Image (tube, helix red, strand yellow):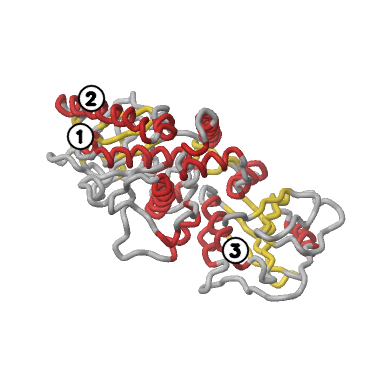
Amino acid sequence: MAATPWGAHGTYHFRPKHWLTGGTFRYRQCSQCLPEGSQSIREAVIMMKPLQILPFREPTAEEQTAKAQQHTVWRQEIRDWLIAYPFTAKLVMRLKLVMVVDTRVPTACTDGINVFVNAHFAAQCSSALRRFVIGHELYHVLLGHFMRQYGRERLCWNLAVDAEANYRLMLDGLWMPLDAVFYPAQAGRNAETIYQWLLKHPRPEMDMPFDRHGEELFAPASIDDDNNALVVDPDFAPLRVDTDMARQIIQHWQEMVLQEAQQVSSGSIPAGMKLIVNNIAKPQVNWRTTLHDFFLRHSGSQLTWNRINRRSLAQGHYLPGRQGKALSLMLAIDTSGSTQRQLQVFIAELQALLTSAEHVEIHLIECDADIHRERVINHVQELQEIGSDNGDGLTLRGGGGTDFRPVFERANDVMPECLLFLTDGYGRTPEATPDLPVLWVITEDGKAPALWGHVVRLENA
């Protein structure tokens, strides 16, 4: 919602490490100024120019009163919502509503457990807008947006998840503001697909996301105080979760959704929510999650928060780095023509996943009946050129069969940590099971080529 005064980002950015009780924040240019989540140590290190000082303050007594008043108003709104949308309202009541006055929260945000709402923004909301905000944040939680960003560019990702959430709200029949993020051409698509579309279709008047998500809860924000001071509210304490904790939160919400669904008739569940219920009741294997899990299990290095990924940090992302040797993998792509349609989606997901790797070595092989080309990629950014119309992309070939055996023979020489094979699955495989971990990434209409290896299908890609 770009129209609100809290939606614009200024030039003064800060990244607090800890709070002071009052006074000033100390600024310096430092790659180690990381938000570790503690709020007890009386110092804050900020990413800006050396020795710059900027005042900050906590919410005033009047603002604390406004927070309490708005909390009462919004809780009553949720109770009133029970009449028209009982299923949705009962789920919303399981979120903890926290009113804040904080520079980092211009409108609202969620960490999967709490919904933080700026009290100044809340005071300007109509009843319909309050319901939109609450429903919007609930869908962020139910769709797991807080654990799906990986290394994607923040603005485009926020727009993508907003569009996915708003489409569900539209199906539910909720009122939406005119400037709500929504792309008719991408209606019904998931956030990952919308993200790729946004990268290819930049808008001159690029929209602003409504709220903040995931890693951005701990990212820089702008100054909106009349006295040019940062406003830091101790009540804004979002939960920083690792992958395991995030999945526990998602599983917990899935159980609650099914529990509520069992207590009402199917006809009383809004259309957008029904998609959530059906997906939980009849789950499909998410190929993106499978790809992520495969890397965590088989990469020679481990993700660690003790070694921060400086490459992602320079881009404004706070991601774990890898501890250990460089990540070495072989990526084989069947260029017979069957993989062309889903190639870019897969490569984009792979690039987002590998952003957290400090060092990477990818042995890229183009093949069909034989290996036609092999090259080594040492930078994740080089993956962007694969499958693109420009640059050093793939040579896609039509017709002919596929033989997987030359690739595995080459893998015996290279000895990567794992092998990813993007194919439709129609081809000859080695008779003996290879010693290295193999992930068959099969196109939507393809088949598993062998009885060994892990198989993931690019459904809904």
Viewer-proximal residue among 246 and 12: 246
Q: Name the image quarter holding residue 198.
A: bottom left
Residue 231's x, y, as percent?
22, 35
Residue 390 vs 92, above or below: the answer is: below
> Which residue position holds label 3?
343
From this viewpoint, is residue 77 visible? yes
> Which residue position holds label 1?
56
Residue 454's x, y, as percent?
72, 48
Disc with the residue nearer the chain's start (1 vs 3): 1
Residue 346 vs 64, above or below: the answer is: below
Viewer-proximal residue among 78 and 117: 78
Disc with the residue nearer the chain's start (1 vs 2): 1
**SS of the residue at dot 3?**
helix
Quadrant, the C terminus: bottom right
Residue 400 vs 165, above or below: the answer is: below
Residue type pointed to by label 3:
Leu
> What is the spatial separation of the Cα atoms under label 1 and label 3, in whole angstroms?
48 Å
Q: How crowded is the residue under tag 1: few (<14 C-alpha within 10 Å), some, or many (20+)?
A: many
Residue type pointed to by label 1:
Phe
Q: How crowded is the residue under tag 2: few (<14 C-alpha within 10 Å), some, or many (20+)?
A: some
Left/right placement of residue 45 relative to residue 32 reads left
Left/right placement of residue 287 relative to residue 414 reads left
* Residue 68 marker: 2
Viewer-proximal residue among 220 and 199: 199
